[in-house]
Amino acid sequence: MRLWALRMTDFEATRRFFHLPKGMIYLDGNSLGPLPKSVPARLEAMARDEWGEMLITGWNRAGWMAMPRRVGDRVGRLIGAPDGSVVLGDTLTIKVYQALASALEMRPERRVILSDSGNFPSDLYMADGLVKSLDRGLELKIVAPKEVADHIDETVACLMLTEVDYRTGRRHDMPALTTKAHKMGALAIWDLAHSAGAFPVDVLGGGADFAVGCTYKYLNSGPGGPAFIYVAPGITEDVRPALSGWLGHEAPFAFDLDYRAGAGIDRMRVGTPAMLQMAALDAALDVWDNVDMDDLRARSIELIDLFIAEVEARCPAVTLASPRDGTKRGSQVGFRHPEGYAVMQALIARGVIGDFRAPDIMRFGVTPLYIGEAEILGAVGHLEEILNTNEWDTPVFRTRAAVT
């Protein structure tokens, strides 16, 4: 097939930004992004020159205290958020809790949290736990992804969805679903874990009330990197943080015994941020200074279309689990196979790194920043050989590891 020839973004240059082990085809950046080459030096300098030499004074002299907001603005530009509406810190699970608790308090007369069966389980676990803790007759209603719009009614307090399905890459229509939620008087919370850095996102234009996400996938901040939360500027001052941490206080160092929420997005800060991880993210975000998000999106669709065409032509034992229409998926593709786990382990043994999601999906992230046609064709060649020879059919490849 003919591939897109004219590109404004130099993807060969962005590839050089990352450390990629020799001989490896890395198709799991949707789970953990690779190491940007600038990060080790940034971490060493921070540890040596800031933590080492400044010690506690680094909070002022090195600007540590301002980093969650400053770096939050850098993330915000990738998700269509205005400056001052995104802050970093904690984990995505914590940010889901913050957004959901605040949304429920803003709609006290309503009882339903609407989500779907394609949502990431951790989001559903947090919602279920919050429902039980509040003990005021709330209901977590989970429907099929295609049925979400039909269930948005006057009983719904908030819509809580992950924009891109973590298994299949199926993408929700954020503006359409948010518009319907608002029409019915509900708030909309969007999890952008598989969106931020994967394609252009516009939380402001899409009307999201809250958006949350992690940074260790497409934003390459490293394992355990900080999460982010966005609150729409028009409602920020109405949001009462359920997790009233000291750094979300109006005056943290007044050490008042009573909590007063900070101004704007600062109220969504909780505890002391992990500064080394924050520095890693700050360095990792430099690659986006030279990336046009529309170019990235076009290239992602092109590469995944190639992947699908080659797999379907050469690997009849697997079936496509993702939307065929590139505009309806994120930057990942899944294929089903009854022995998907073992097949994926055989691929990993050959240096083709994807992952597996129960019950039967082999999942591949396609990140144009460092993936091109050669990696796609190489991965399909290995998959074809493994399936044709039943190379996967061994006890070693069938044995489940702690992380799949």
Image: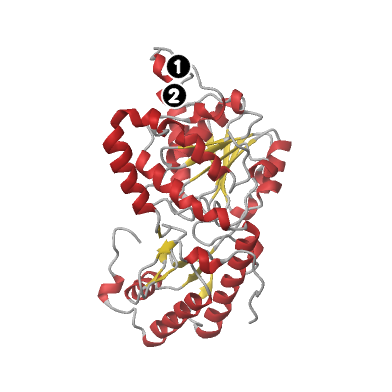
Which residue is under mark 1?
A: 259
Measured Cα–Cα span from mark 1 to mark 2: 7 Å
Residue farthest bottom in this picture: 389
Is the C terminus in the top left, top right, bottom left or bottom right quadrant? Answer: bottom left
Amino acid on which the number 1 mark rests in the picture: Tyr
- Residue 307 in percent (x, y) is at 54, 75
> Does residue 148 appear in the picture of this structure?
yes
Q: Secondary structure at mark 2?
A: loop
Residue 358 higher or lower than 252, as above or below: below
Query: What label sits on residue 315 in the rendered view?
Result: none
Residue farthest right in this picture: 183
Type of colouring: secondary structure
Residue contact at pointers 1 and 2, CB within 8 angstroms: yes
Residue 235 higher or lower than 277, as above or below: above
Amino acid on which the number 2 mark rests in the picture: Ser
Is the N terminus in the top left, top right, bottom left or bottom right quadrant? Answer: bottom right
- Residue 321 in percent (x, y) is at 54, 68
